[in-house]
């Protein structure tokens, strides 16, 4: 039976409308082991409906032991997935799942306007 030897974190709201907003996901690996990072992006419908994966799984490389990573949604995730920017479907709202092949990884996400007015920063949910 397969079991994850790592951490899965969920950013429950980010925004891909890069004409108005920027979104960042910050993760930190306090463990003594490096781990590969994989991203999956899902729609966040405004008025109901089912979530669907946007694009394919995206490998971001390795997160070193004791290291951190600043993931820019538009530049590091949506563009490599071939998703046209600005992403405006459902107001640009998306969910991002981050899988790290290391245990105990923690993180935060942030959405802010281009003039640096922030919607706030919130902890990623560990699944």
Image (cartoon, rainbow, N blue to C red):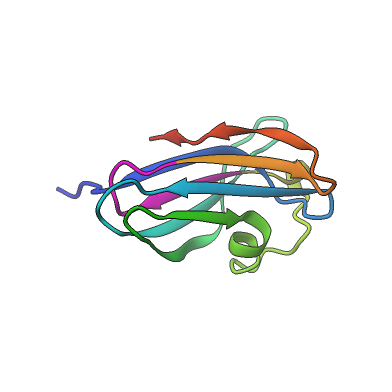
Q: Residue at x 60, y 63 (%)?
A: 76
Residue 85 against residue 8 in the figure, above or below: below
**Pick the front one: 70 or 95:** 70
Q: Residue at x 28, y 48 (%)?
A: 31
Q: Position of residue 38 (x, y in %)?
A: 43, 58
The reply, left or right, for residue 35 in relation to residue 108 is: left
Q: Position of residue 125 (x, y in %)?
A: 46, 33
Task: Tell me how many marks there are.
Answer: 0
**Pick the front one: 26 or 50:** 26
Task: Assess whether residue 19 is covered by the magenta stretch.
Answer: no
Task: Assess whether residue 96 is covered by the magenta stretch.
Answer: yes
Q: Position of residue 5 (x, y in %)?
A: 23, 49
- The part of the chain drawn in magenta is 95-106
Q: Within the image, what quadrant is residue 75 found in?
A: bottom right
**Pick the front one: 111 or 13:** 111
Q: Position of residue 45 (x, y in %)?
A: 67, 37
Q: Residue at x 48, y 39 (%)?
A: 10
Of the 4 image quadrants, the one containing the C terminus is top left
Residue most extreme to the left: 1
Q: Residue at x 37, y 49 (%)?
A: 29
């Amino acid at each position: 039976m397969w079991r994850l030897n790592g951490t899965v974190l969920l950013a429950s709201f980010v925004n891909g409308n890069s004409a108005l907003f920027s979104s960042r996901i910050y993760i930190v690996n306090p463990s003594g082991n490096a781990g590969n990072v994989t991203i999956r992006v899902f729609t966040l419908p405004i008025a109901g409906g089912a979530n669907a994966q946007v694009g394919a799984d995206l490998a971001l490389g390795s997160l070193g032991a004791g290291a951190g990573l600043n993931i820019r949604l538009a530049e590091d995730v949506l563009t490599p997935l071939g998703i046209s920017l600005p992403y405006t479907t459902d107001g640009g709202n998306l969910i991002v799942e981050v899988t790290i092949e290391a245990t105990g990884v923690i993180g935060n996400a942030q959405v802010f306007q281009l003039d640096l007015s922030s919607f706030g920063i919130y902890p990623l949910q560990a699944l």
